[in-house]
Image (cartoon, rainbow, N blue to C red):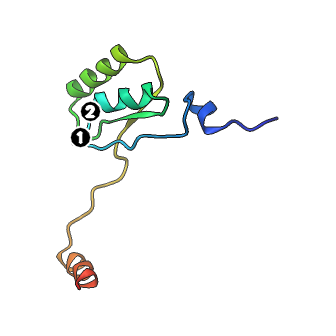
Amino acid sequence: MKAMTLQQLLGIDLPIIQAPMAGVQGSALAVAVSDAGGLGSLPCAMLAVEAMRNELSAIEAQTRKPYAVNFFCHPPPVPSPEREARWRAALAP
């Protein structure tokens, strides 16, 4: 049995997955990447439910190509002034 390529698995023409950039990108970029043959991605972690519905509706209205929907799946870091001081010292000139 022959292994599937990434393109075959995702139903895309190019082996390109667009990084979902929460807070700076919406449906337009995801549509453009998907239409160009890659896998466009919609960042949803910072969207309210209604905004997410609107963005997903916009994608569905503009392309029939595959796209990804991305959410954060990690706990937010706990602030630590000591840890921040250590990395700042390590990166200081």
Say left or right for 61 vs 80: right
Residue 32: quadrant of the picture: top left
Residue 79: quadrant of the picture: bottom left
Q: Disc 1 vs disc 2: which is toward the camera?
A: 2
- Residue 43: % across, % down: 32, 38
Q: Residue furthest top?
A: 61
Q: What separation in Å lies between label 1 and label 2 (alpha carbons)?
A: 11 Å
Q: Name the residue at 37% across, 47% down.
A: 73
Q: Is residue 50 above or below residue 92?
A: above
Say left or right for 90 vs 60: left
Q: What kind of residue is marked 2?
A: Gly
- Residue 11: % across, % down: 57, 27
80 and 70: which is toward the camera: 70
Quarter of the image that includes the N terminus? top right
Q: Name the residue at 56% across, 30% down.
A: 13
- For disc 2, the marked residue is 26
Q: Secondary structure at mark 1?
A: loop
Q: What kind of residue is marked 1?
A: Met
Q: Secondary structure at mark 2?
A: loop
Say left or right for 55 vs 60: left
- Residue 76: % across, % down: 27, 56
Q: Name the residue at 47% across, 22% down.
A: 65
In the rendered structure, find residue 9 and report the number of the disc placed on it. Answer: none
Q: Residue furthest front?
A: 36
In the rendered structure, find residue 46 and report the number of the disc placed on it. Answer: 1
Q: Residues within 10 Å of mark 1 (few under 14, many from 20)?
A: few
Say left or right for 85 vs 66: left
Q: Residues within 10 Å of mark 2 (few under 14, many from 20)?
A: many
- Residue 6: % across, % down: 61, 38
Residue 86: quadrant of the picture: bottom left
